[in-house]
Image: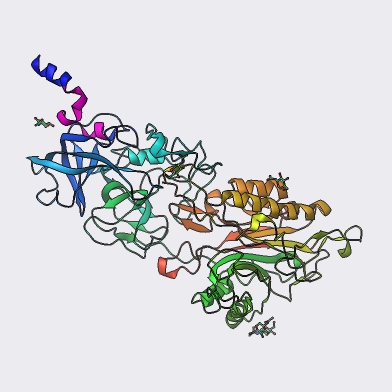
Amino acid sequence: MKATLVFWLFAGLRSLAAAETIAEINGNRFISPYSGKTVTNVTGLLIAKGPDGIWIRSTTPDDDDATSEAIYVYSKTVGSALSVGDIISLDGKVSEYRSSDSYIYLTEITSPKNVQVVSTGNAVKPLVIGKDTLSPPTEQYTSLDGGDIYSVPNGVANISAENPVLQPTKYGLDFWESLSGELVTVKAPWAVKTPNKYGDTWVVGDWTVTGKNRHGGVTMSDKDSNPEVIIIGSPLDGTKNPSNSKMGDQFEDITGVVQQAYGFYAILPLTAIKTTTTASAAAPPTTLLSQGKCKALTVGSYNVENLAPTSAHLPKVAGQIVYYLKTPDLLFIQEVQDDSGPTDDGVVSANATLTALVGAIKDLSNVTYAFTDINPVSNEDGGQPGGNIRVAYLYRPEVVSLYLPNKGGPTDATKVVAAQGKGKSLDSAPTLSFNPGRVDPANPAWKDTRKPLAAAWTAKGASRPFYTVNVHWSSKGGGTSLHGDQRPPINGAVAARTAQANVTASFIAEILALDPAANVIAAGDFNEFAFVQPLKTFAAVSKMVELDEAVKTPVAERYTYAYDMNAQALDHMYVSPALAKSKTTRFEHIHVNSWAAFDDVVSDHDPSVALFDVCG
Ligand SMILES: *[C@@H]1O[C@H](CO)[C@@H](O)[C@H](O)[C@H]1NC(C)=O
Ligand SMILES: *[C@@H]1O[C@H](CO)[C@@H](O)[C@H](O)[C@H]1NC(C)=O
Ligand SMILES: *[C@@H]1O[C@H](CO)[C@@H](O)[C@H](O)[C@H]1NC(C)=O
Ligand SMILES: *[C@@H]1O[C@H](CO)[C@@H](O)[C@H](O)[C@H]1NC(C)=O
Ligand SMILES: *[C@@H]1O[C@H](CO)[C@@H](O)[C@H](O)[C@H]1NC(C)=O
């Protein structure tokens, strides 16, 4: 009786009196129901020790998959007199920690006091993911993403504010949150990409993985951005993960604790990852070969990452163009810097940069490219300050040449001009008022970004010109990660890219309105995935077809970039209906960079090569 009375009297101060289980402290949501409160006599098995704290697992688990049975106790000193295998009890304060307001919170116990050892030498068994736990969901991240993590508008809700109930069978972040603090084992792990400079390595284990590509990366697709991939962070024992692992490398089983760290759910391994099998970094060169005439013309595209005349990677880019792209007849390149590189000195010409690239290619291949580009107005096109990056074309003049060349300046908008002639004759084809020329450069959609470069060409043997638009749309900079607090995550500059898509597409639509059978190729770094708003707008307005879709590249092989957990396609070719239907049309992504180890990466993007019949 008396005890009951005391209990009710102190109900308001329950947090001072009763012992909460770890599952109760974590609760079934992202944020603890005890956040900010003091808890006493929290009892758990010490499952791991780290430099700044310990992890304990409940000795009185519940049977709810949504409530983690483990928790981090933050204190540099608490672990010093304790050992893994001790069952301990302690008092402390439940805190929610994050070092940036774009991150999800970590639930932890801080200021531990009255630490008592209940028993020692208990067995510590990690939970094998997918066997002792649920398997990670493979497609969706959270219930706040509306079924599509790339839907617009972005950032309509914050996990920290909504604090949704965890659904660990459906949503990836809910799954990892439901294991927060747990000691887990990843069986038969392999790397899906190169680690970052700290050795943090994205892996999957022996659970169900969707989007696995032939090399062992995991490729995103429409409404599937791979929450089953998890990052292995800094080892708890102070060792270092290998810095040279790469897509497809296999590792020994990894055991560590699940922790929200630097904005990502991570597994902090007890010790460094050990590689068992290394994947080959030798990307096969393109199989697409030019016939040196319109019947079989090769077209490449490559973002060469801030290429300047003195760039250490310039000879390597040249080597890739020669040995892997097989010196395509026409090459769209992006991110060419001016002759003084990133020095901000008013120089805008890229003649020295392009001359150096063409010279390096010639040295290796005896192929002499011509080039064309249009200098931007200094510092108006975004990118590295002073670098004045632009898109450019390299072309083999013995195979392709500009049709009625008339190079425009930075502020000249090239116009599609209807021709006088009739039928299929050359003089009946639409022309460009500036060739090459920039597409609507004064349009506000292009503020602080690269203007597309349009050109009309004739290929050897062709009866009609073909048309190209080389793009480098605004980057995703300023966005938030797929593991971030804002939902759906902020897709940086998505509105700008949608506007850029419309301007680019409207220009192409004018060509196709005059000549629905025209051969048109738009290629480059669109900085967007084909299934996201900007490229949906682009395809709808232009009637262009994504080339991977036209040639039915397996969905998992559609990637030109590896970022965080995903292999993904930021670079594309889009072609007009005539080229999409043509039996000659082929397309290949050449994974010279996404398969390479960190130190061997030449550019952050992979190049691609296509084969077309552009005769007429
Ligand atoms: C602390 O909890 C344990 C069980 O978890 C119990 O045996 C013990 O009596 C509790 N101690 C106090 C002081 O409440
Ligand atoms: C989400 O949190 C961020 C950072 O605190 C804030 O800027 C933003 O307005 C919040 N979004 C919503 C929808 O409340
Ligand atoms: C470009 O550079 C080459 C090699 O330095 C030089 O011969 C040529 O005159 C330059 N062209 C222009 C337009 O400056
Ligand atoms: C280099 O190219 C030129 C012009 O196409 C050709 O005449 C010459 O035979 C080639 N030389 C070699 C070594 O391939
Ligand atoms: C594209 O731009 C035009 C002209 O500004 C506008 O009328 C149209 O609604 C836009 N279309 C899309 C899909 O954004």
Q: How many marks?
A: 0
Image quadrant where residue 289 sits: bottom right
Give whichever of 560, 5 is nearer the camera.
5
Report x, y in % for residue 415. Answer: 79, 60
Q: Is residue 288 magenta?
A: no
Determine if the magenta segment contains residue 20: yes
Res 232 visible:
yes
- Residue visible at 26% across and 33% down in the picture: 34
Most common secondary structure along the magenta stretch: helix
| Residue 122, above or below 249 | above
- Depth check: 382 or 267 in front? 382
Q: In the image, what residue occupies the spot 46% across and 62% down?
A: 595
Q: Residue 90 placed where, x, y %?
A: 14, 39
The spot of residue 309 in percent (x, y) is 56, 78
388 or 555, which is in the foreground? 388
Which quadrant does ligand 4 occupy? bottom right
Q: Is residue 613 visible?
A: no
Over which residues does the magenta segment extend? 10-25
Asked whether, in this view, residue 493 is left or right of residue 367, the answer is: left
Report whether 401 appears left or right of 420: left
Query: Whole-percent x and y of residue 93?
Result: 21, 39
Which residue is found at the position 44% from the left and 65% from the top? 596
Colour scheme shown: rainbow
As drawn, 261 above or below 395: above
Quarter of the image containing the N terminus?
top left
Decide if residue 184 is on the left or right side of residue 554: left
Q: Quadrant of the C terminus?
A: bottom right
